[in-house]
Amino acid sequence: MRSRSRTCASPGTRLDVALFGALAIVWGGASLGAGPVAQAAPAGKPVGTIAATVPAPTQPRPVTAAGLTPLGEPQDRPFPGLITLTVDASDLDHHAFHVSESIPVEAPAHGSGEIVLLLPKWLPGNHAPTGPLTSLAGLSFRADGKGLPWTRDPLETYAFHVSLPAGVSSIEADFDILTPIDSKDGRVVITPGIVNLQWSSVVLYPQGYFSHGVRVAPRLVLPSGWKYATALETDSPGPDIATFHPTDLETLVDSPVMAGANAAQVDLDPGGPAPVRLDIFADKPDSMVLRTDQLAAHRNLVREAYRLFGNHRFDHYDFLMALSDQISPIGLEHARSSEDGVPLRYFSDWEKMAPERDLLPHEFTHSWNGKFRRPADLYTATFDTPMRDSLLWVYEGQTQYWGQVLAARSGLVTRQQALDLLAQDAAAYQARIGRRWRPLQDTTNEPVIAYKAAKIWPSWQRGTDYYVEGALIWLDVDTLIREQTKGQRSLDDFARSFFGTGAGEGAVRTYVFDDVVQALNAVLPYDWAGFLRARLERFGGEASAPLDGLARGGYRLVYTDLPNDSFRLEEARRRGCDLTYSLGLSVDQHGLVREVTWEGPAYHAGLAPGAILVALNGVAFDGDALKDAVRAARAEGSAPLELIVRTGDNFKIVRIDYHGGLRYPRLERDPTVPARLDDILAPHTRRGEGG
């Protein structure tokens, strides 16, 4: 998954959500305070004697779940039989997937028995328990045409205990997945023109087996005339029905489908070692037209990735791209594909989309870093096994770094755009004072703590900082290797040896912290364990953003009164006024305060997110007027800015005593240091050169 937010108000943050499991214990027995009441002590008798005659209350006993088979440990053994799965994705009006499954079962020898079926809970790429349990409706089971009773497990609510009568060899399951209709209710995956199907949301699987031991034969029903793309192998396309080759559950969940009424496919590596395709699905057909330079940049991406990693990890690869303002944005990695949701005008407004153009490089990198090489605590045998996210600063942080680097090397962004975007990242994390109390290592728990939960004060709370701050650490590593080896070695050498071993090898290879350290030492002997731990675990007043890589790369972070082009375009696209590095706030075009920097000037004046700026210095609020006022307040003796602010039904006057002028981040070349950052961003292949 890629960190999508790039604005200066909350750069690099991917607002994430967590589901918490709680064990509720219900106590029986006497209520507190019930029972015999002590009487007054008779004359001449000690109180203790009377108290001893009062019976002690009965010790309450906890209630335990009864009548359900405990969920046992899964076994690495094949599930007997083949599950057939049919998903009807043609109900566009109601945004619903209608699902039917036929599941083989082992018939009870005598009397009745049960099977436990699970909906996937812990989803790869999300690093969190984000299975769509609340979208499930209409669940029913049958055997031989008769309905079967079922019970949800009270502790593991993704598990369903289904009763089996004697002699049954298979059961039928039917249910609906009711997907969000409005983005405020969750991710929109069905629109009148595009469907994004993730099999993890539409399959029940038997408990007790490793995911790779469960075989599924999937079938998909689509609206009439639609086309689709997926990493799955198709057995028979059929009219509006696609039947896919049976596969294991792990591969199925890793192979989503994108489908739509308007579709195009682009070959990104003609004559290459494996087919690599850009599968485009769009709200409007005219938005799918690529210019020659755009096509060249996407083809260069494949070539530059092969050059970086030294090989390919797949027999074919599909970028499943949704060009849409209706389907919710997404960036999600898979071994042989990726889900890439970008704005409808991604190609037609190319010059304005620089912050979006590291998405495909990021997800492509995950084929090597994340899908082939994976942290050991993120590779679970089943989708009901909790994940541990301790190495996300490698899984996501280094992928974030390579996504930005490959975007520049391939020409998806210019060198200057890459520098401008890096300046915004560096400034944001320089200002992230939450580092005082929360080390970067702790942010790797964020997907489980708060997957997609909005942060009111991200500068103080922190979030998924392992993405962008992690990327800054890897820039630090890269420039240090280049400096110490006088340009003879780099992080490219680490990527090739660590992620690029074994061309075409599909099996997952896991790693732990010590493996990362060992691979770095093979490139450059150094105290890498101490180096990394210091940046991951330090916090407190002395903890600073990891910006040494910029300085060693030949650049320094400075602030000027004019925004760089990338900042300006992003501010215009968000239709607001971003004064994060001056007043410490960002507002939309109507004066709604989107974000306030903790302990910044606006914070100290009493502003908070959600407030509405009604007037400035006695005149109705306007974003450009606010910038003019900040600029004018630099004059000696100028008065504080005076704002009329509305919060709910309350109004108040807020005065911001700030006189530092407008401040926007940019990178300035330091001529005393070699331009190592320029070397990192420069193309590493020549036109026509192979991998």
Image (cartoon, rainbow, N blue to C red):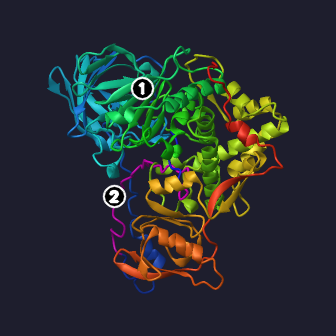
Relative to 81, say whether 561 is above or below. below
| Magenta part, dominant SS | loop
Q: Secondary structure at mark 1?
A: loop
Q: In the displayed structure, does residue 43 sit left or right of residue 135? A: right
Quadrant for the C terminus, please. Answer: top right
- The image shows residue 575 at horizontal and vertical percentages of 43, 58
Furthest residue toward left: 145
Q: Quadrant of residue 367?
A: top right
For label 1, count other residues whose C-alpha is less than 10 Å away and answer few (under 14), some (14-19) or many (20+).
many
Query: Residue visible at 40% across and 84% down?
Result: 42
Residue on which the image places disc 2: 29
Q: Nearer the viewer, mark 2 or mark 1?
A: 1
Query: Residue visible at 56% across and 64% down?
Result: 580
Q: How far apart are the two marked residues, 2 and 1, measured between alpha carbons?
A: 52 Å
Query: Residue visible at 50% across and 40% down?
Result: 127
Confirm whether residue 459 shows in the render: yes
- Point out the stretch of residues depicted in magenta: 8-37
User: Viewer-proximal residue, 199 or 675?
Assistant: 675
User: Viewer-proximal residue, 562 or 19?
Assistant: 562
Residue on which the image places disc 1: 255
For label 2, count other residues whose C-alpha is less than 10 Å away and answer few (under 14), some (14-19) or many (20+).
few
Is residue 9 in the magenta section? yes
Confirm whether residue 105 shows in the render: no
Q: In the displayed structure, does residue 350 sit left or right of residue 501? A: left
